[in-house]
Structure formats: structure tokens, C-alpha cells
């Protein structure tokens, strides 16, 4: 099987961001409540309990000869107040050195809507959010001089809704790239709209099998004429300090771990790792992701 960077590097496909989310197979639309939320469901940033910054680095598809791809992510959420809401900032970048690079810049806002809609928090908490996105693509055409531009940028946006019910069920919806964004160089090439419906279930202790602090999540993603399914689980043990995650999608299996270090004044340092094994690329022995997050 011949594999190139192009076959594993689709345009702005929203696949390789957030180590916690990746450990759950990318099923995060109805879970989002931290600094990974801006690229999954911006509405979830309204549920962030603290300010948080996260930094991620990765190596994708290790072992593929001639393929060198890296993905990086930085996110920040800043809860202001219940009446005002939460602002967020995020940057993601995926690149093949000397060939192609994509950068996405996000500025988001989200708010819990219970007071506006007069919803009982003992039944459900409902949030909504919006993301402004700027996409920038750089392509090396392999010649020193070309009549084509090597950089192309376009603006677009996301919207999201997240309902967290008191019985542990979460329902989320995120529509990404809602405004057509043309990132083509030689001809029109618009980034396709992505719609994702997410479901989640959380329990402090899963009935019968007694798994502590358990979350199960499922995302169904619609892009163009295709449908994709992502699923994952997460559990916290050792007094909620150690996280264990499993997940997957059609073409990959994921496993992840996280550990939380607590300090004074409720500040926390979180180290997360995820490993993804592609199921359709036999030459690769997997992708590795690591992130540091700081909550304060």
C-alpha cells in the first residue's frame, strides 16, 4: 500500500485535537467542559469551572516512511461570571514540513441560558456558544517561483448547544464551518460544513459494575454526504487523580491516560497522553499525543 502525506492529511478535518478528547475516540461534543471544548463544542466552555490553558504536541503516523506530520493545539477558557459567560481562545496547527500547513484561530463565547429561558437547574443546564474562526493554509508548490499564492486564508464560524441533564445524560450539537470558507489556490475549494450530534452519560459510580466517575460518549458526525461515528469512555480512579480512557472510530482505536497534580488555591496541573492506532495503515505503529493543562 502506497501512503503519502496527502492521504492522511485532509483539509481542516477536525480530527487530531485535544488529548483528553482523543483518548475517548474524539467523542466529545456532549462532554466538552474544558480547554479542549473550543474545537469540539464551543457551548461546553460555559461549563468550565476554572480558567484553564492547555498545550498539546504530537507525532502522527509514526513509522510511515516519508511521512512526517505533526499536530499542535493550544486552548484557553476564561469563565467570567454566570451572568456574562465564558470566553475562549484556541489555535490548532497540522503540518507536513516543506509541503503543507493548516492553522485555525478561534475566538469563542458561550453562556448558560437557564436564567434567560427560566429553566430549572435541578432538571437541566443548557448552554449555547459561538466561535469565530480564521483558517489559514500554506502549500509549497515545489518550485521557487510560482504565479500562485502560497498562503490562503478565510473566515468562518461555529455554533454549539449543550444540555446537561441532572440524571447524567448530556446532549450536544455543534455546527462547524457554517459560513463557506474558500481556501483554494488555483480554483475554488470550500471547507465543508460539519454537523455533529453528541450523546453522553455520566455517573459518579456506574451501577452494577461500580466503575467510578464514569463517562460514556457517542458522536455522530455528518460532513458532505458522509457519516462518521466516534465513541469513547472515561473513568477516574485514585481519588479522581488518574484518568483512563478508551475510544475509537471507523479507522482508528484510541487509548489515553491523564494524571492531575493538585496545588494550593485549587490550582491543578494535568498531564494527558493518548495513543491512536490506525486500523487501515499497516505500516504505521501509531500516533502519539501529549498535553499539559493548567487550571487556576
Image (cartoon, rainbow, N blue to C red):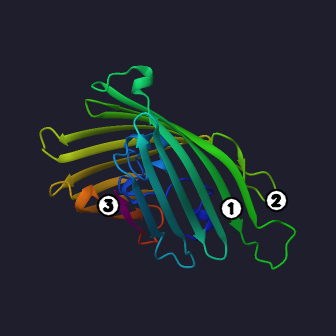
Figure check: 65 above or below 217: below
Please state which of residues 94 and 129 is positioned toward the viewer in this rendering: 129
Residue 176 visible in the snapshot: no
Tell which circle, 2 or 3, labels the residue nearer the N-terminal end: 2
Q: Secondary structure at mark 2?
A: loop
Please give the label number shown on residue 186: 2
Distance, label 2 to label 1, CA atoms, is 13 Å
Which of the 4 image quarters holds residue 55?
A: bottom left
Q: Do the CB atoms of the residues marked 2 and 3 lie less than 8 Å apart?
A: no
Figure quadrant of the C terminus: bottom left
Give the crowd class for mark 3: few <14, some 14-19, many >=20 residues within 10 Å. Answer: many
Which of the 4 image quarters holds residue 245?
A: bottom left
Residue at horizontal 71 percent and vertical 52 percent from the top: 154
Please state which of residues 189 and 251 is positioned toward the viewer in this rendering: 189
The residue segment tinted magenta is 289-296
Give the crowd class for mark 1: few <14, some 14-19, many >=20 residues within 10 Å. Answer: many
Residue at horizontal 35 percent and vertical 50 percent from the top: 50
Figure check: 267 above or below 216: below
Disc number lying in front (2 or 1): 1
Q: Mostly what secondary structure, the magenta segment?
A: strand
Please give the label number shown on residue 256: 3
Tell which circle, 3 or 1, labels the residue nearer the N-terminal end: 1
Please state which of residues 250 and 148 is positioned toward the viewer in this rendering: 148
Q: Secondary structure at mark 1?
A: strand
Residue occupied by mark 1: 137
Q: Do the CB atoms of the residues marked 3 and 1 lie less than 8 Å apart?
A: no
Distance, label 3 to label 1, CA atoms, is 30 Å
Residue at horizontal 42 percent and vertical 61 percent from the top: 54
Distance, label 2 to label 3, CA atoms, is 40 Å
Q: Secondary structure at mark 3?
A: strand
Q: Left or right: where does residue 199 sit relative to residue 103? A: left
Residue at horizontal 55 percent and vertical 59 percent from the top: 91
Amino acid at each position: 500500500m502506497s501512503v503519502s502525506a496527502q492521504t492522511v492529511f485532509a483539509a481542516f478535518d477536525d480530527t487530531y485535537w485535544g488529548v483528553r478528547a482523543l483518548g475517548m475516540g474524539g467523542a466529545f461534543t456532549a462532554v466538552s467542559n474544558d480547554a479542549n471544548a473550543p474545537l469540539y463544542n464551543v457551548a461546553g466552555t460555559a461549563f468550565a469551572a476554572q480558567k484553564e490553558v492547555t498545550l498539546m504536541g504530537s507525532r502522527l503516523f509514526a513509522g510511515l516512511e516519508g511521512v512526517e506530520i505533526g499536530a499542535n493545539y493550544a486552548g484557553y477558557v476564561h469563565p467570567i461570571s454566570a451572568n456574562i459567560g465564558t470566553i475562549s481562545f484556541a489555535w490548532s496547527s497540522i503540518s507536513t514540513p516543506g509541503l503543507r500547513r493548516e492553522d485555525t484561530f478561534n475566538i469563542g463565547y458561550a453562556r448558560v441560558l437557564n436564567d434567560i429561558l427560566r429553566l430549572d437547574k435541578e432538571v437541566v443546564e443548557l448552554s449555547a456558544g459561538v466561535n469565530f474562526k480564521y483558517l489559514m493554509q500554506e502549500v509549497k508548490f515545489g518550485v521557487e517561483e510560482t504565479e500562485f499564492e502560497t498562503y490562503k486564508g478565510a473566515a468562518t464560524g461555529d455554533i454549539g448547544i449543550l444540555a446537561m441533564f441532572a440524571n447524567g445524560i448530556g446532549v450536544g450539537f455543534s455546527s462547524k464551518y457554517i459560513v463557506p470558507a474558500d481556501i483554494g489556490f488555483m480554483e475554488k475549494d470550500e471547507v465543508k460544513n460539519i454537523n455533529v450530534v453528541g450523546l453522553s452519560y455520566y455517573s459518579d459510580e456506574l451501577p452494577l459494575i461500580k466503575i467510578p466517575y464514569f463517562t460514556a460518549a457517542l458522536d455522530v458526525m455528518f460532513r458532505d454526504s458522509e457519516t462518521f461515528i466516534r465513541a469513547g469512555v472515561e473513568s477516574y480512579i485514585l481519588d479522581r487523580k488518574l484518568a483512563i480512557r478508551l475510544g475509537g472510530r471507523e479507522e482508528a482505536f484510541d487509548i489515553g491516560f491523564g494524571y492531575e497534580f493538585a496545588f494550593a488555591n485549587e490550582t491543578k496541573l494535568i498531564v494527558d497522553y493518548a495513543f491512536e492506532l490506525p486500523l487501515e495503515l499497516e505500516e504505521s505503529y501509531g500516533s502519539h499525543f501529549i498535553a499539559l493543562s493548567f487550571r487556576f
